[in-house]
Image (cartoon, rainbow, N blue to C red):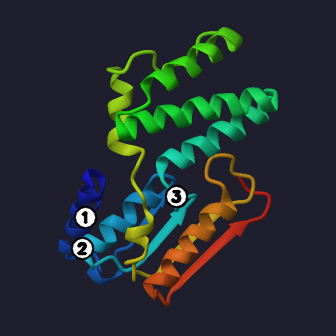
Amino acid sequence: PDLAGDVVAAVDYLRSRRDIDGTRVGLLGISQAGWIMPLAALRTKSVAFLVSISGAGISPADTTLDQARNELTMAGMPPQAVEDIVHVQRLLYEYARTGQGWTEYAAAREKLAARLGPPPSTIPDRPDDPYIQTIRRFYFYEPGPTLRLLQTPTLALWGELDNNIIAEKNKAAWAAALEAAGNRDFTLTILPRAN
């Protein structure tokens, strides 16, 4: 919401300038902007168009799990180790979301650390770690409700080979939401062999 407010302020500023046609101010953004631009477009209603490049249609938590799974796999990590790491991340996210399950998470983290070595700071070892507050504030945003209200003309692009924002999965989420919105002016495209 804070970043969407910044976008609205930028749009308002551009529309106030005499050297700019205020009816033609649009938004173009990459990655996280896929969550932010639709929020801004709903707030101001004066955004002429929206172009999203690799914008997620799923939550940051789900996006992060996809990215971890893909990057670890691409790095050559054994499949069981990848699934164990993703499982620990899921437990962490569940703890951050609900405040429940620290014991189960800590046990899984300890088991993983014994097998693979010390985990990174994104797999914290104490319930009051500041990173958990970051997860709580950001990772559980669900873009679907916002996208289901979006009437702004939209172009969304994804790269077929993107290992962070899974193209088919996110395109499907955008498509379902924009169709539910009754948005009549959107194009969703996956670029072959692009990352």
Q: Which residue is mark 1?
A: 8
Contact between marks 2 and 1 (CB within 8 A): the answer is yes
Quadrant of the image for the N terminus? bottom left
| Amino acid, disc 1 | Val
Contact between marks 1 and 3 (CB within 8 A): the answer is no
First along the sequence among labels 3 and 2: 2
Q: Residues within 10 Å of mark 3 (few under 14, many from 20)?
A: many
Judge whether residue 24 can be spotted in this image. yes
For numbered disc 1, what is the local secondary structure? Answer: helix
Looking at the image, residue 31 sits to the left or right of residue 13; the answer is right
The circle drawn on residue 58 is 3
Judge whether residue 123 can be spotted in this image. no
Where's residue 111, x and y in %?
A: 63, 15
Q: Is residue 117 above or below residue 81?
A: above
| Separation (CA) of disc 1 from disc 3 | 22 Å
| Amino acid, disc 3 | Ile
Q: Residue at x 48, y 19 (%)?
A: 121
Q: Is residue 43 above or below residue 178?
A: above
| Amino acid, disc 2 | Thr
Looking at the image, residue 190 sits to the left or right of residue 96; the answer is right
Q: Residues within 10 Å of mark 1 (few under 14, many from 20)?
A: many
For numbered disc 3, what is the local secondary structure? Answer: loop
